[in-house]
Image: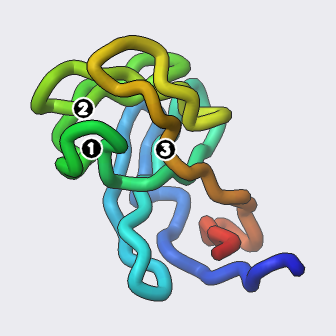
């Protein structure tokens, strides 16, 4: 059963090349704007249990600031050790300049 979309940020709050952490229904989610494409992923590294919001972001990935494990923004797939488990991704959409995440 699909979840409910929740309005989290205005698009202007996450310019291209940036990311912003939000809490949606008790879930720590990171909104990433990579090359004008929005992604919503878990803000917690599956290996180190650290927040990802301070990690580097590339065109297609977010890196854990603790050990450098990278995760694919589109799928959550762990791209390199030490992480082997993916992070959760969430459907995201824009409605009237608002970013909404489905949880």
Residue denoted by label 2: 64
- Identified at 40% across, 84% down, the residue is 26
Q: Please name whichever residue, 38 or 62, is drawn nearer the observer in this view of the structure.
A: 62
Extreme-top residue of the structure: 80
Q: Dot 3: few (<14), some (14–19), or many (≥20) neighbours within 10 Å? A: many
Which corner quadrant holds the N terminus? bottom right
- Identified at 48% across, 25% down, the residue is 78
- Identified at 51% across, 76% down, the residue is 8
Query: What's the mark number on residue 87?
Result: 3
Label located before the other in sequence (1 or 2): 1
- Label pair 1/2, CB-CB below 8 angstroms: yes
**Marks 1/2: CA–CA distance:** 5 Å
Vertical comparison of 29 with 38: above or below? below
Residue denoted by label 1: 52
- Label pair 3/2, CB-CB below 8 angstroms: no
Q: Secondary structure at mark 1?
A: loop
Q: Secondary structure at mark 3?
A: loop
x, y (%) of residue 81?
A: 32, 14
- Label pair 3/1, CB-CB below 8 angstroms: yes
- Identified at 65% across, 34% down, the residue is 75
Label located before the other in sequence (3 or 2): 2
Vertical comparison of 25 with 75: above or below? below
């Amino acid at each position: 059963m699909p979840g409910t979309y929740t309005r989290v940020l205005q698009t202007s709050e996450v310019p291209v090349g940036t990311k912003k952490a939000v809490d949606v229904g008790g879930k720590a989610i990171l909104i990433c704007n990579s090359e004008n494409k929005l992604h919503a992923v878990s803000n917690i590294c599956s290996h180190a249990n650290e927040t990802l919001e301070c990690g580097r972001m590339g065109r297609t990935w977010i890196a854990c600031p603790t050990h450098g494990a990278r995760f694919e923004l589109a799928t959550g797939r762990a791209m390199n050790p030490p992480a082997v488990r993916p992070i959760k991704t969430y459907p995201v959409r824009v409605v009237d300049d608002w970013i909404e995440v489905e949880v």
